[in-house]
Amino acid sequence: MSDENPYKKLKAPHLKKNIFETPEGYFGDLKEKITLGVVTEDERILGSEQLKKNIFDVPDGYFDKLNEKIISATKLTEEEGILGNEALKKNIYSTPENYFESLNSEILSKVKSETKVIPLYQTTWFRAVAAAVVLIMVALLSMPTKQLSESDLLSEVSDEAIINYLEERQAIEYELLSSVEGLDAILDNMILEETSSYSFALNENPELDYDFEYFDH
Amino acid sequence: MDDHQIVEGFKNPTTKNKAFSVLLDKYQQRIYWHVRKIIIDHDDTDDVVQDVFIKVFKNLDGFREASQLYTWIYRIATNEALTFLKKRQRKQAWSIDDISHDLENKLTSGSYIDGDEIQVKLQKAILTLPEKQKLVFNMKYFDDLKYEEISEIIGTSVGGLKANYHLAVKKIEEYLSED
């Protein structure tokens, strides 16, 4: 019936008997050997207490200051570095005499004149100029298409030339607008709209992060 | 008059001019020095500072105090100063190097500058920095603004600002150590 239950044999007590042996007195010697090994290590040259003496020294009061040093070193490097020199913080720029006294009244007078003038430009001049610009652009755009297709025209012009043209035109627009008397205000207004819309946007949505266009690359 | 009172006073037509005058007295010098360190030249700075406060005047009605008044003004000033440099660069068809070179010239030969050798050298070192590092360094080192405040002004995270500041300090220290 052993076929029916092959594991039954493993339950026989005599199978658990340890069949391995050691030489006589082995465990007694083992303890001694281990102890001896450790002791001899200590008793070699390096075991000498004299050698363990610390020959290095520190300046007086060094450890009292160490903590302080570490804390200050973890602060911004300016504290210890060249930039920690207070003289560097001196403002080297100056202004003409009484500059700030006159600045105040100058701004106030500009603010007063601007508040009266601006709406006029916004309503009449600005719209008239904008309309004229649109008309001229429409005329310019519609003319060449009668003779040649746009792609025919553009294929003859190098990319570089197009970029140069666009950059030049932008510069010319600025020049033109700023050189025409009275249009300064319009230009200012355009720039104002461009640059200050963030302040409104920010007020509406404080969480909005306005990105400056920086020079750095 | 604190900032909140200035803003409120400005919204009331009868106290508007008075409030704006107080605002000017309070901030014109801080803003002037902030812009001056970016533009270097006094006359150019004068133009920009006036534009800044005219813009403040035009937009203060819509200011809802989501940020502090002075960080808002700093923000406008920073933007105006950078726009000024960009406009000049475009007008003269200059490269970025030309701009820094021009600013450096103004630093050495311009009027209304009075510093010893090392102090001028520091300003030159600042001119070599990329725009953002320059701004952060000026506002932190000279103006003692907090990172949170600078963050409101130039719209970069505090972590990013710290990184920029450390880079700036490192570069400047290197520059100043050179002979």
Image (cartoon, rainbow, N blue to C red):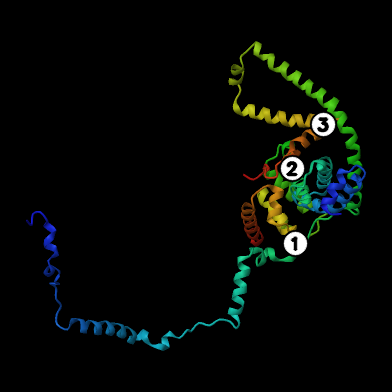
Of residue A71 and residue B45, the one placed in the foreground of this image is A71
Q: Amino acid at mark 3?
A: Ile
* For residue B85, above or below residue A82: above
Dot 3 or dot 1, earlier in sequence: 1
Separation of marks 2 and 1 at Cα, in angstroms: 34 Å
Q: Which residue is mark 3?
A: A186
Mark number, residue A89: 1
Q: Are marks 2 and 1 in contact (CB under 8 Å)?
A: no
Dot 2 or dot 1, earlier in sequence: 1
Provide the chain ID for the residue under circle 1: A
* For residue A134, above or below residue B140: above
Q: Amino acid at mark 1?
A: Lys
Q: Please tell me if label 2 and label 1 are on a single chain.
A: yes
Residue farthest to the left, as pictured: A1
Q: Quadrant of residue A182?
A: top right
- Which of the two marks, 2 or 1, is nearer to us in this view? 2
Separation of marks 3 and 1 at Cα, in angstroms: 41 Å
